[in-house]
Image (cartoon, rainbow, N blue to C red):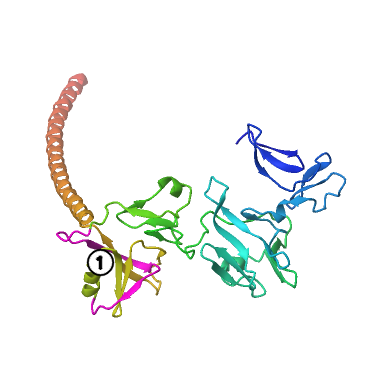
Amino acid sequence: MNSAEFKILVGNLMLMDESQVSIWSTNVNLTTSNSLVTTLGDNGNLVLRNESEPRTSEGFWQSFDNQTDTLLPGSSLAYDKRTRTKKVLTSWKNSEDPAPGLFSFELDPNGSQVIIRWNRTASGAWNGLFFSLIPEMRLNNMYNHSYVDNVNESYYTYSFYNPSIKSRYVMDVSGQQCDVYAYCGAFGSCNQNSLHFCNCLPRFKQRSKNDWNLKDYSDGCVRKILLNCSNDRKDKFLVNNLVRLPANSQRVMAGSAGECESICLSNCSCTAYSYKDNACLAWNRELMDLQQHAENDGNKRMIYIRLSASASESSSTKKSKGRVIGAVVGSVAAVMVLLAIVMICISRKHISRTTKEVEGSLVAFRYKDDF
């Protein structure tokens, strides 16, 4: 990809790879390319136009009308009510692949709000200053946000009060929010305050480590040891607190936490349960949309994640081995320390005696020298 280059061929601006094969094109299908040129404006807009047209013309194609993941000052999110077409920001598939990803940022054609799409997650209506559910828009007074809604179109654009400032909006490959449904995939937990938004639950591992390294968490996590629903060994539950409960729970009739646990254990499909205020909630199969809350969050709940009896036994065995190894290491270390102390004492005694003998010789020598 290092040797890729832009060329104007057969009436289009094309991106050619090292083998001179087109990997991207403007697809405007003009009849001639003899007088075509491309110009990059100071605002970052790339325009394909006739050489005879002024640089300020919109030309046959412009990047501001064909956005990818980036919104520059002066460009817009838009919905054309006449043609029912949109200008949309779309995330990359992952941090290295610019193919269309899971998330998009667009205007709602049915109202004055923006939508972050994965499961049509609304980001709030326009209140005259900003979109209500995007608090970042009100954090900085350098931006001049503008929303227009008329008979023909609706669009959002922004600029800077100080034109010398350079910035851009980017639709990140992650969507950058834990409120996006299933953002961390199955058995993944999202934490807005963590360095890495997504983590697998304890006793689970990443389904695709490579995808996670590229910040694509949608495949989620899988169990390290599968459930087997064996009657001779009871599965155990691992408590996870300070969470927003996953989606798609089922309410179960239970009079206590113990009864709630028993009901979940009796169903091979049950993967987790939660009990609070005389309400028993159970989840079957994969857990989706689990979010970690802060310590002082009033919405925190406890959820009990089902683990294989083998996983529990393995964990207990490891802890037991760890305690045994720790005891052995501790004992050996104590003996070594004791031996070291004894050796130091012996050495000091030997050094002290030798020093006295040497000092005695020196005194005797000086005494003789005084004569």
Q: Point out the image quarter for the C terminus.
A: top left
Any magenta on residue 150?
A: no
Give x and y (percent) for residue 74.
73, 59
Q: Is residue 126 above or below residue 19?
A: below
Left or right, 197 with reference to 281: right
Left or right, 275 with reference to 180: left
Q: Which amino acid type is shown beneath numbered disc 1?
A: Asn
Asked if residue 30 shows in the view, the reply is yes
Left or right, 274 with reference to 121: left
Q: Residue at x 66, y 72 (%)?
A: 129
Give x and y (percent) for residue 22.
66, 39
As helix, strand or loop, the secondary structure at mark 1 comes to loop
Q: Which residues are magenta?
A: 229-256
Q: Residue at x 71, y 56 (%)?
A: 65
Q: Point out the image quarter for the N terminus.
A: top right
Q: Neighbour class for label 1 at 10 Å: few (<14), some, many (≥20)?
A: few
- The residue to which callout 1 is attached is 267
Give x and y (percent) for residue 54.
86, 49
